[in-house]
Amino acid sequence: MSMKRTFQFITSVGMVVLVMAVIGSAMLMTHDDMPAADDGVLDIREWDFHADGHVNMAGEWSFYGEELLRADTLSERAAQPERIEVPKSWNQQELNGIDQGYGYGTYRLQLLLPEAGVKYGLKIPSMSTSYRLYVEDQLVAGAGAIGTSRADTTPHYIPRIGFFIPPSSQVEVIIQTANYEHVRGGLWLPVQLGLYEELLRADKRALGLDLFFYGALMIIGVYHLILYGFRRKDPSTMWFGAFCLLQALRTILVGENFFMQMFPGVQWDVYLRLDYLTFYVALPLGVTFAYSLFPEEMSRKVLRLSQSVGVGFGLFVLTAPPRVFTAWNWLYQWLTVLTCLYVLMVLIIAIRRRREGARLQFVWALFYIATVYLDILYYHEFFATGEFASLGLFVGMGTQSLIIARRFSRAFEKVESMSAELKQMNDGLERKVEKRTEELAMVEYSRRQLISNISHDLKTPITLIAGYVEALQNGVVEEEDRKQKYLKVIETRVKSLHHLIEDLFELSKLEAGQTSFHFKRMTISAFRKQFAHRYELDVVDAGFVYKTNEQDTEPSIEDSFMVRVDAFRMDQVFTNLIHNALKFVSAKPGEVQLHMHAKLYEIPLLNDKQNIYGELQIEVEDNGQGIDAADMPYIFDRFYKQDKVRNSANDGRGLGLAIVKEIVERHQGRITVCTKHPQGTRFTITLPMTSATS
């Protein structure tokens, strides 16, 4: 297993274990061995606050609906109280005077303490939505204004820690509370009892943890926004940064509610709207972030739907009264659950398609969605553990940091690789420039040689013609026979010049691709029949021996394979090569040979099949003067002639082989030459063959 896969496997297993640990801890926190109140009495005389810490004042309390009572008035009341479960909202219980979570009443609990005269503390969570807490007749804590109607009740959220010093080991705790604004009323979070100094320290630790998450989320959020500012091609950093800033704000709105501790004068409905908005905006931001990472896997319709729903619920929170928009929070929570499941499905698809970072994103999303789900269960009073989403996002920050670190690492590796490649390219470019410079120098040299050659091949006959003409004009030659001889020489030189110009024009058109070719398919046997004996008379009339091979392959092969040729141009090729051979044949007896061979090749394919293709090889060979090894690289160049003197005794113009090469290459063929210096030269032309049925 590679290091990369090992790292991904360990990370995935670690994240899954962390998810299970969080869920397990949540379950354990709701099933601990703390003492519980029974029939309105909480007996904690055996509880050791120093060793065991605080205790949740949970269990069965006494409750007086539609009454605001104190210790001095409870004795005058004859009616028996109801029993109410704490922590649990009024909505989850049937109580007199409470209508769907709205109303007012009094909680009562008798405390049996380990000892008197000790400074105890009570940590009261945010309560829906106003309260006053008394121990005996001492007011310990309160928030908002208690009233018997909506008009004279003022809601307020803020966790508080109060203290009391009991004169005896038995005291009464009385909580007056009223709610007319929030969908849930009553004590749906537990009141904690412990030693005052210990509770203060625990509160500072909890507040410090909230501020740690807040600071970390703020720093990471701003960092990602700065990253986006420097590199706008990747919008995922912007959306993740915005998501972190939003969750940072939410961190100080929930839990220890640091926001209200810093701004106690903020109205309750403003705070509540901020709380709900951070939840409602988080969904479209998270989905947009996921879409920016995997746009090909996620549906744009789902993206637009989540954004529309988030904006709609956000406007609903801003315009509707709290008792209305808090009643519909459950709908958005379940929409969040469904959307989270869809995002997980998208990430699974991304993993299957091997998208970069998909595995890490999946394990983080799994962990974060688990914490969101726990928060939803917490709000529905399945657990009394508090919120975990900040922890989930904090883990997400680490995941994103790993992904960004990997991206930067790969970017640097790519830069280094590209730098090395660029260096190689520069080195190669320098070599190419040097080579090109040499080629240009050769081209310039060839150009000068070409001009020199053309000048030579034009100047020599023109000079001779001018001399003969001048002799005729000046009367130097008076005999009629000599005059005719001079005129014959002039005619020969003029024809030679004419052929030279024609060859130059022909070669220029061939190299520019302006010469028309009339290709036609013919079988190998037809090609052999047309050209094999065509040049025999020319060779014999020159006093030499002509040889050609008869059919050396099976007739079925030469009849079933074809070549695509322009017969006129191929005749031009053979004529050039044969006449070139005749110029250099000096041995007795001199020989010129023209041989043709059909070559077949097999290429194995799949399913035990084979692809057969062939080549026609044509050889023009003589036993005359060979070619010097120093001349071999240049024999197909313009005006290159084997004789360095370049005298007029030889009527060669040095263009024939250059024309031959251009014509053969236009037939998709190739021409090569080999020699046995100082005697014998063979030119080999190779043309592609195709099946007659193709």
Image (cartoon, helix red, strand yellow):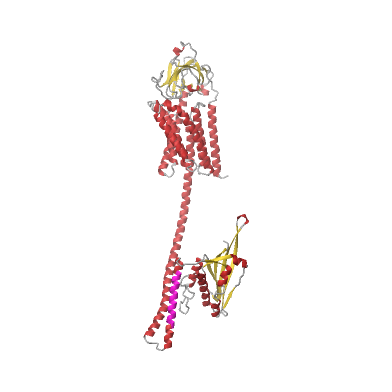
Quarter of the image for residue 307 reads top left
Image position, residue 71 (x, y; %): 45, 14
Tell me if residue 546 comes above or below residue 687 in the rendering: below
Q: Which is more toward the observer, 523 or 246? A: 523
Q: Is residue 497 visible?
A: yes
Taking the magenta stretch, the answer to whether it contains residue 676 is no
* Observer able to see residue 364: no
Q: Is residue 649 left or right of residue 554?
A: left
The image position of residue 96, as x and y in percent, is: 48, 17
Give the quadrant of the N terminus: top right
**Does residue 439 appear left or right of residue 549 in this picture?**
left
- Left or right placement of residue 157 versus residue 58 in this view: left
Q: State whether the magenta stretch is mostly helix, strand or loop.
A: helix
Q: Nearer the viewer, residue 447 or 558?
A: 558
The magenta span reads: 488-507
Examine the rendered structure and indicate whether residue 474 appears above or below residue 413: below
Looking at the figure, which quarter contains the C terminus? Answer: bottom right
| Residue 237 location, quadrant | top left
